[in-house]
Image: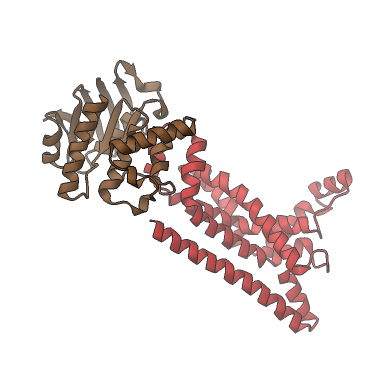
């Protein structure tokens, strides 16, 4: 179960973070000024905070004692605390800075003259984005996505604060390892650690291969 | 075909005032590096705004005409071929974004490839092409959409002498066959002389007839 939970949380958080980072990063890619600075600070903030602080903020924002949490509970009988949904929200916030930086770096690799020429050839902004920009920065972007996924897979602090550790409900690889060690079940903890290590190694290998492919293509 | 420019633009600390009428089939533009030749082309394309003044092509003021509707075949210094597309994909790009049907695109791509002698390259990736082949593909991509004006920014840089000569002949042929006006930025007097007698120099924020 912890492996399935971790994979589910990491996949959902990575997808959500990607679709948040993509439009923001693209719309700000050629902009300067205070507005861009403020947005980037807000998005990057979780990177400089301990995950437990993010967890604390989420508990105070989404917990049943908070305005939003109370509203969700009273109106829909729904709470994100101690659920996988809560873990996904916490993990999304933790990985968003990494995803944003990855997507931003990908856009920066695009040669402006490609976009200029596409424009002179009558390509609309959407055509330029989907037919020129995205395909040409995809390998770099994929590296950012994989790094975000790996970070999501290893998320501990914020997830534990928001989703807790409930066996067969909210247990993830990292929280399980912590509690298995506390219970003295070292062998199971090592097994989960090896699984996590394997997934991380595969992701890093893919990132390396993507980097090599990109260099060869250029 | 006449292109008249009369505008000013502040570039760094220098105010740039350009005024000229280009009415010859081929006009060469020369000048030292950093003089603003590429910026001039980007202004004509509408990729950069001008501060004051007008750009008029064949009687049409381009002030409110977006880049996409100016029908310009633009070759930047690096050619900017799309690396994710094959040669055929690059050639057909301008037609496919205008929703031309696949059969017509295929026919026009073959036609332009034959014209430029690159029909054997159609399925190749851009990274597998030589410098001269890339020039031809970039020219083909610009020509396939029937532009009224061609802007070539130092298109023959980095080519060996034989390829450069072949490209110069090709440019002359294109302008004659297609009845297109060409503005060409070059650093080589020889290149300019081989193509035209009309040479402008960009210097100190001004455009002067040589």
Question: Relative to residue B155, is residue A73 drawn left or right?
Answer: right
Query: Which colour denotes chain B?
Result: brown
User: Which residue is drawn at the image coordinates 62% and 64% (left, top)?
Assistant: A151
- For this rendering, which residue is in front, B94 or A67? B94
Residue B60 rendering spot, x and y as whole percentages? 33, 17
Colour red, chain: A
Q: Is residue A113 above or below residue B59?
A: below
Residue B205 seen in this snapshot: no
Residue A63 rendering spot, x and y as whole percentages? 80, 54
Residue A126 rendering spot, x and y as whole percentages? 52, 37
Question: Relative to residue B23, is residue A122 drawn left or right?
Answer: right
User: Which residue is drawn at the image coordinates 27% and 26% (left, top)?
Assistant: B178
User: Which residue is drawn at the image coordinates 83% and 46% (left, top)?
Assistant: A72
Residue B179 rendering spot, x and y as whole percentages? 25, 24
Question: Relative to residue B39, is residue A38 drawn left or right?
Answer: right
- For this rendering, which residue is in front, A175 or A215? A215
Q: Is residue B101 above or below residue A189?
A: above
Question: Relative to residue B121, is residue A143 drawn left or right?
Answer: right
Residue A39 seen in this snapshot: yes
């Amino acid at each position: 179960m912890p492996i399935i939970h971790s994979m589910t949380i990491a996949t959902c958080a990575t997808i959500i973070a990607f679709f948040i980072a993509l439009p923001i990063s693209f719309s700000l890619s050629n902009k300067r000024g205070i507005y861009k600075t403020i947005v980037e600070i807000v998005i990057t903030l979780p990177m400089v905070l301990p995950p437990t602080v993010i967890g604390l903020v989420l508990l105070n924002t989404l917990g049943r004692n908070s305005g939003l949490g109370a509203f969700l509970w009273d109106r829909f009988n729904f709470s994100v605390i101690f659920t996988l949904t809560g873990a996904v929200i916490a993990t999304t916030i933790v990985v968003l800075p990494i995803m944003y930086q990855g997507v931003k770096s990908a856009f920066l690799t695009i040669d402006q003259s490609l976009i200029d020429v596409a424009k002179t050839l009558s390509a609309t902004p959407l055509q330029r984005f989907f037919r020129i920009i995205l395909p040409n920065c995809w390998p770099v972007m994929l590296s950012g996505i994989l790094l975000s996924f790996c970070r999501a897979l290893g998320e501990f602090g914020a997830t534990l604060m928001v989703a807790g550790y409930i066996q067969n409900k909210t247990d993830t690889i990292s929280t399980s390892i912590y509690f298995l060690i506390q219970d003295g079940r070292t062998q199971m903890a090592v097994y989960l650690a090896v699984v996590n290590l394997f997934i991380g190694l595969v992701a890093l290998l893919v990132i390396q291969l993507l980097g090599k492919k990109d260099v060869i293509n250029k | 075909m006449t292109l008249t420019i009369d505008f000013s633009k502040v570039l760094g600390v220098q105010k740039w005032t350009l005024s000229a009428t280009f009415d010859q089939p081929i006009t060469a533009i020369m000048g030292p590096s950093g003089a603003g030749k590429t910026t001039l082309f980007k202004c004509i394309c509408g990729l950069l705004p001008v501060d004051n003044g007008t750009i008029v092509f064949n009687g049409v003021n381009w002030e409110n005409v977006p880049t996409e509707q100016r029908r310009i075949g633009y070759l930047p210094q690096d050619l900017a071929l799309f690396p994710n597309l094959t040669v055929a994909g690059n050639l057909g790009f301008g037609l496919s974004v205008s929703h031309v049907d696949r059969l017509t695109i295929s026919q026009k791509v073959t036609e332009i490839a034959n014209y430029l002698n690159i029909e054997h390259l159609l399925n190749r990736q851009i990274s597998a092409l030589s410098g001269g082949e890339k020039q031809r593909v970039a020219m083909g991509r610009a020509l396939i959409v029937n532009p009224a004006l061609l802007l070539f920014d130092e298109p023959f840089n980095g080519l060996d002498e034989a390829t450069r000569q072949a490209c110069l002949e090709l440019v002359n042929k294109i302008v004659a066959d297609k009845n297109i006006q060409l503005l060409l930025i070059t650093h080589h007097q020889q290149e300019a002389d081989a193509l035209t007698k009309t040479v402008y120099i960009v210097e100190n924020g001004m455009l002067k007839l040589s």
